[in-house]
Each structure stands twice: as structure tokens, then as C-alpha cells.
Image (cartoon, rainbow, N blue to C red):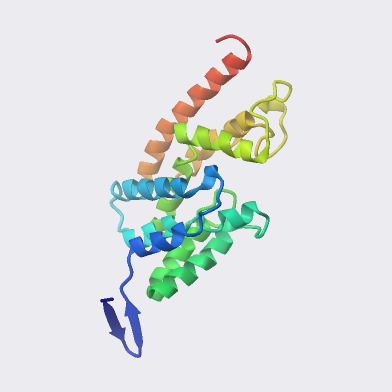
């Protein structure tokens, strides 16, 4: 039987992150590998890990709910149906959580996390939960997994791995015209966007791995290794 609390004229049902996870997974039936349900699961695990390393007070139910929901709009953005999956996802998170009976404060907190998680938007995280989600999402774009996701995403878009005639020094695109250039322009700078001490520590380790990969890649394409 569903547990319920009555506050004044309103009745609020108890909700769980597991319920949110079940709802969120239904959005990922046709999502390309770089942003699929496995990515969401990794982000949720990273968020839990980071939360366990902070002394700040964290609402882990809100954090996990936001982690499960943060990319529910990704497939729609990739299909060109919406402009910003974080903005759309925040509204969808609000709908899902309200439907599950979450109280307004929890809904608002999770909605902010989803809205603020995107690297390329101008919404800064304003709560510990939002900062942890941002760090977890960015960490999944670093290290061995981050390299794999980067080249996977480039393959989805038909972009080249590398162009010897377009080194990163002369590439004037914002994100990088090749995947190697994207790694150098964006991925290697992700550690600068970390908000938590634990996130920064993990990011430095993963960044070192990526830097080593880039050095090896460049030697291999030059025929030196």
C-alpha cells in the first residue's frame, strides 16, 4: 500500500528514487550510445560516490532523481525536436516527480539540477545536489569512458577522428572540427568546471589519462609509435 502524508488539504505520497528510475528509463528506447541509459546509470553511480565524499548536507533522493532524469530529453534534441534537452528535461522532471507525489520543494530542487547540468548552457548550479550532478555528468566525459563516448558521438554524427591538415591550433570551431580536436578543446578542460573537491580530484586523474591518450594518438598518426 502506498504510504501517504496529509498536510492541510493536500495529500502527498511517498516517492522513491527507484520509482523515478523506472519512469526515466522509458525515455531511452532509441537513444544513441553516447548518451544512452548506460551513461545515465554511470552518472547516477558517480553522483552517489561524490555525495559520499562531501561534508555538505545532500538530499540524496533529490540527487538521484535528478541523475535518472537529467538526459530524458537527449533523444528529442538529437532528432531536432527540441533545442535544449536540459530545459525540456527540467520541465519533464517536474511533471514526473509531481505525478509521483513529490513535494514542491523536492520537485523544484530536482528541476534545477536537471536544468543546470548541461556543460554548454549558462545556468549555474546553485545547490549541492546540482553541483554534484554537474560534476558526475562531466566526469563521465573524462577518462577512458569519456574518450570512448567522444569518438562514439563523432561516429554518430559522421565526423572525422582526425585531420592532419587541421591541427587544433588552427581549428577555429568552438567544439573542434574533429574528435581529436574536440578532446583537446573541450574534454581536457572539463576539470576546470568541477564544483566539488571530490569531483576535482577524480577529474584530475581522468584528465591525466586523456592527456596521455592524446599524446599517444598524435605519435601514432605521425608514424612515430
**Residue 165 % position (x, y):** 74, 22
On the image, the x and y values in percent for residue 169 come to 68, 26
| Camera sees residue 147 | yes
Residue at the far top in the pictured view:
224
In the image, residue 136 sits, relative to residue 6, either above or below, namely: above
Seen from the viewer's position, the closer of residues 60 and 34 is 34
Quarter of the figure with residue 206: top left
Q: Is residue 40 left or right of residue 177?
A: left
Image quadrant where residue 127 sits = bottom left
Instruction: Identify the residue at horizontal 50%, vertical 25% (top origin).
Output: 211
Q: Quadrant of the N terminus?
A: bottom left
The quarter in which the C terminus is drawn is top right
At x 63%, y 51%, the residue is 78
Asked if residue 195 shows in the view, the reply is: no
Along the horizontal axis of the image, is 56 left or right of 149? left
Observer-nearest of 102 and 30: 30
Determine the residue positioned at 55% across, 48% down.
Answer: 119
Amino acid at each position: 500500500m502506498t504510504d501517504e502524508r496529509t498536510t492541510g488539504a493536500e495529500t502527498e505520497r511517498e516517492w522513491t528514487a527507484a520509482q523515478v528510475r523506472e519512469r526515466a528509463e522509458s525515455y531511452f528506447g532509441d537513444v544513441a550510445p553516447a548518451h544512452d541509459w548506460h551513461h545515465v546509470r554511470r552518472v547516477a553511480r558517480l553522483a552517489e560516490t561524490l555525495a559520499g565524499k562531501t561534508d555538505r548536507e545532500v538530499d540524496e533522493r533529490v540527487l538521484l532523481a535528478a541523475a535518472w532524469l537529467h538526459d530524458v530529453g537527449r533523444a528529442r534534441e538529437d532528432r531536432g525536436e527540441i533545442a535544449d534537452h536540459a530545459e525540456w528535461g527540467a520541465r519533464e522532471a517536474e511533471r514526473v516527480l509531481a505525478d509521483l507525489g513529490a513535494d514542491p520543494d523536492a520537485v523544484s530542487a530536482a528541476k534545477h539540477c536537471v536544468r543546470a547540468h548541461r556543460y554548454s548552457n549558462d545556468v549555474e548550479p546553485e545547490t549541492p545536489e546540482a553541483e554534484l550532478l554537474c560534476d558526475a555528468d562531466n566526469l563521465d566525459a573524462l577518462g577512458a569512458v569519456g574518450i570512448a563516448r567522444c569518438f562514439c558521438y563523432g561516429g554518430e554524427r559522421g565526423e572525422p577522428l582526425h585531420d592532419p591538415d587541421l591541427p587544433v591550433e588552427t581549428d577555429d570551431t568552438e567544439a573542434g572540427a574533429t574528435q581529436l580536436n574536440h578532446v583537446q578543446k573541450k574534454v581536457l578542460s572539463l576539470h576546470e568546471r568541477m564544483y566539488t573537491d571530490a569531483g576535482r580530484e577524480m577529474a584530475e586523474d581522468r584528465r591525466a589519462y586523456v592527456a596521455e591518450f592524446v599524446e599517444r594518438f598524435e605519435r601514432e598518426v605521425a608514424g612515430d609509435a
